[in-house]
Amino acid sequence: MAFTLSLGSEAPDFSLRATDGNTYSLKDFADVKVLVIFFTCNHCPYVIGSDEVTRQTVENFELKGVKFIGINSNSPNTYEEDSFENMVKRMKQYNFPWLYLYDETQDIARAYGALKTPHFFVFNEERKLVYTGRGVDNPRDASKITVNDLENALEELLAGKEITNSITNPIGCNVKWDGKDAHWMPPEACDLV
């Protein structure tokens, strides 16, 4: 069985606290046309390098009924920067236009099969997975981006078209699993394509 959610899978539910002080679950977004859930963190250079590109994507699509939720599943025992307190500080500093949730148990990262930070999952109105993978082809250095797979997928989905590239390999740092070496990945976790 694949580690990462397969296309057509339903979005796994969650109940996670956010940096805004509230706790959210899937039902809180029932009226949203398209839901983008992405696994991210505070310290990863691929996240830091592409956060402003992700911000632009959110701003381009939020008025079209697309909601973005960032989830940090990294263990603060691996990188203290990824603690919930530091998530709150980072959101205050950068005022990102997405909700930022904390997956303290890492159960949600396992449920979705998050491989890297960042790793994007796009769900349609029925909350079926229609795209998984990277946001862009060079998240570490925005000046070298040549393709924005996430925006392409969202544009095709909203236009009622089939998504041309529905699976791409996420590019970034692996999720930091608690009690494991910083570079450890579950044995069944591998590239998507």
Image (tube, rainbow, N blue to C red):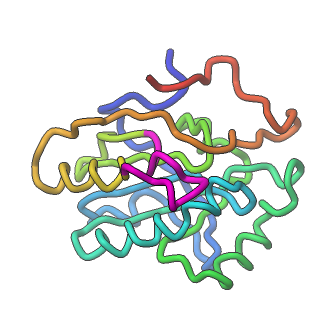
Q: In this picture, is 160 found above or below 115?
A: below
Q: Residue at x 42, y 64 (%)?
A: 68
Report the span colored magenta. 133-147
Judged by its main secondary structure, the magenta piece is: loop
Residue drawn at 66 percent across, 60 percent down: 102
The image shows residue 2 at horizontal and vertical percentages of 50, 20
Residue at the image point whose x is 70% and y is 76% from the top: 90
Q: Residue pushed farthest top?
A: 1
**Res. 155 image quadrant:** bottom left
Q: Is residue 65 left or right of residue 117?
A: left
**Relative height, residue 17 to residue 34 (above, below):** below
In the rendered view, tell whether residue 96 sits above or below residue 75: below
Quadrant where the C terminus lies?
top left
Q: Is residue 42 part of the magenta span, yes or no?
A: no
The quarter of the picture where residue 62 lies is bottom left
Q: Position of residue 165 (x, y in %)?
A: 29, 35
Residue at 45%, 31% in the rendered image: 5
Closer to us: 149 or 145 = 145
Judge by depth and name the residue closer to the eye, 6 or 42.
Answer: 42
How many numbered marks have been drawn onto this rendered protein structure? 0
Answer with left or right where residue 78 lies relative to residue 27: right
Is residue 33 toward the left or the right of residue 86 in the image?
left
Against 19, residue 165 (above or below) is: above
Give how far across and how far down residue 26 sits, in percent.
Answer: 43, 57
Q: Is 177 situated left or right of 99 in this image?
A: right
